[in-house]
Amino acid sequence: MTTSDTTDTMPQIEPTLRALAMPADANAQGDIFGGWLLSQMDLSGSIVASRRAQGRTATVAITGMTFRRPVFVGDEVSCYAEITQVGKTSITIKIESWVRRGTGGDAIEVTAGVFTYVAIDSDRKPRPLPPAVS
């Protein structure tokens, strides 16, 4: 992978989620499992989706997922989630993950993906989204 495949500019929004990559989340070589990172991104997106839906949501799709650089034990992972599209029942969110290695330094982008959530009711059936709150 070349550096041209990545973004040099961090999102200009607050992170939705921060987590520390721990040894239990890694393989024997110290690389964090992609599934762990994917779950952090899904948690981040679900926070934004649930706020917009004013209630329960379910993940229905992940598209355009790209693992650009590895994440290591000890990395501080920050997930940035931003709504890109709103439908009748669905919310599409772009999520980027950035890390700071060790005790600081510059953040680097490690993953990006597009997650789609659907607002659901108490019976887990799709429900219309309420109007956006300003």
Image (tube, rainbow, N blue to C red):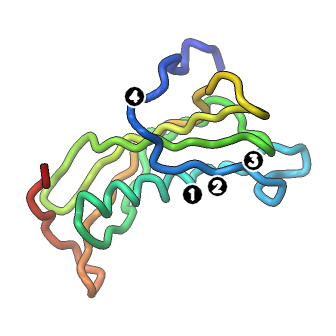
Q: Position of residue 103 (x, y in %)?
A: 77, 33
Identify the residue position indicated by label 3 in the image. Answer: 32
Snapshot quadrant of residue 105: top right
Q: CA distance from mark 1 to mark 2?
A: 6 Å
Q: CA distance from mark 4 to mark 1?
A: 23 Å
Q: CA distance from mark 3 to mark 4?
A: 26 Å
What residue lies at 30% left-to-right and 81% top-to-bottom?
124
Q: CA distance from mark 2 to mark 3?
A: 9 Å
Q: Position of residue 86 (x, y in %)?
A: 19, 49
What residue lies at 13% left-to-right and 49% top-to-bottom?
134
Sequence order check: which comes first, mark 1 or mark 3? 3
What residue lies at 26% left-to-right and 74% top-to-bottom?
120
Front-most of residues 43 and 38: 43
Q: Give the mark toward the camera: 4 or 1.
A: 4
Q: Does the residue at mark 1 contact the one at mark 2 (Cβ under 8 Å)? A: yes
Identify residue type, mark 1. Answer: Ser
Q: Secondary structure at mark 4?
A: loop
Identify the residue position indicated by label 1 in the image. Answer: 39
